Image (tube, helix red, strand yellow):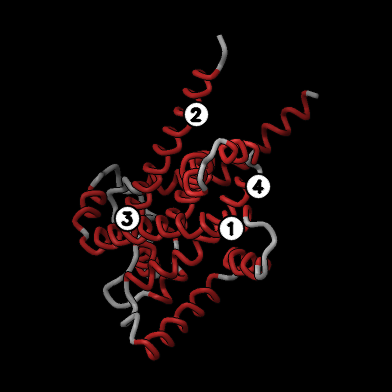
Amino acid sequence: MQRKSNFLNITAGLGYLFLYAPIIALIVYSFNASKLVTVWGGWSIKWYVELFKNDQIIEAALLSVKIAFVSASLAVVLGTMAGYVLSRFGPFRGKMILSGWITAPLVMPEVITGLSLLLLFVAMEGMFGWPSGRGTGTIIIAHTTFCMAYVAVIVQARLSSLDETLEEAAMDLGAKPSSLFFLVTLPLIMPAIISGWLLSFTLSLDDLVIASFVSGPGNSTLPMVIFSKVRLGVTPEVNALATIMIAIVAIGVIAAMWQMRRQARLMKPE
């Protein structure tokens, strides 16, 4: 029994080391005074100062956040509608086709998705004159397209596990379909909607492949800028940027865990 426990501890330790050692090394070298990322030159925060002076990275970061926010919001609206239709409307003609269209972006390679959207935008521009070139708008449309699939799956799963007697009771009490959705169903599926929004925001903020296909000059997102920089070698500024992003994510995770534990303590009977 003791050997089994030691084996599990060693295995878990090696797994954590494999996952987090590169991240720890990146954080440490973000405070490296040397311009060479492989040569330690002492502790310094000058690369963080240089990072905030880099207008290209700052503009790309703001653009990525803007695109991620708009794309996630649109994906939540469209994905919730699609998930609700698939879960609540019962069998109808074209349901299998709709379900296939929604789940296709989940398994489609990003290269194929990006190329398909690029060809679509080029064809639409030739036929209708819109969109006029590639830019922020085309990136938002592309990100909304594949993010709404994730939202639809999450919302559909939540609706499938929802107790329908609550909705039936509201209808028995005279609730109209619109009131039923906004006053009963929507609050019950709100955790799934929030989860879908956060997932969509993360996917949009992190996307590189699809954005590379549908973006135009002057509309480079943060992943595109970082990728263009690391192709010539990792710079200390990139390490500093990655450390800031890791810190933001860590703060969010810690805050969420604290809130969950706080709610658990409040719900625990005394």
State the residue position of label 4. 160
Dot in front, 1 or 2: 1
Which residue is pictured at 66% across the width and 43% down the height?
A: 161
Distance from label 4 to label 2 (Cα)? 24 Å
Dot in front, 3 or 1: 1
Callout 3 touching callout 2 (CB < 8 Å):
no
Q: How many marks?
A: 4
Q: Where is residue 40 in the image (x, y as percent from the top left)?
A: 35, 49
Q: Specify whether 124 is left or right of 2.
A: left
Q: Which mark is residue 236?
A: 3
Q: Can residue 237 be seen in this view?
A: yes
Q: Residues within 10 Å of mark 1 (few under 14, many from 20)?
A: some
Q: Callout 3, which amino acid?
A: Pro
State the residue position of label 2. 260
Q: Where is residue 150 in the image (x, y as percent from the top left)?
A: 55, 57
Q: Which of marks 1 and 4 is nearer the N terminus?
A: 1
Q: Which of marks 1 and 2 is nearer the N terminus?
A: 1
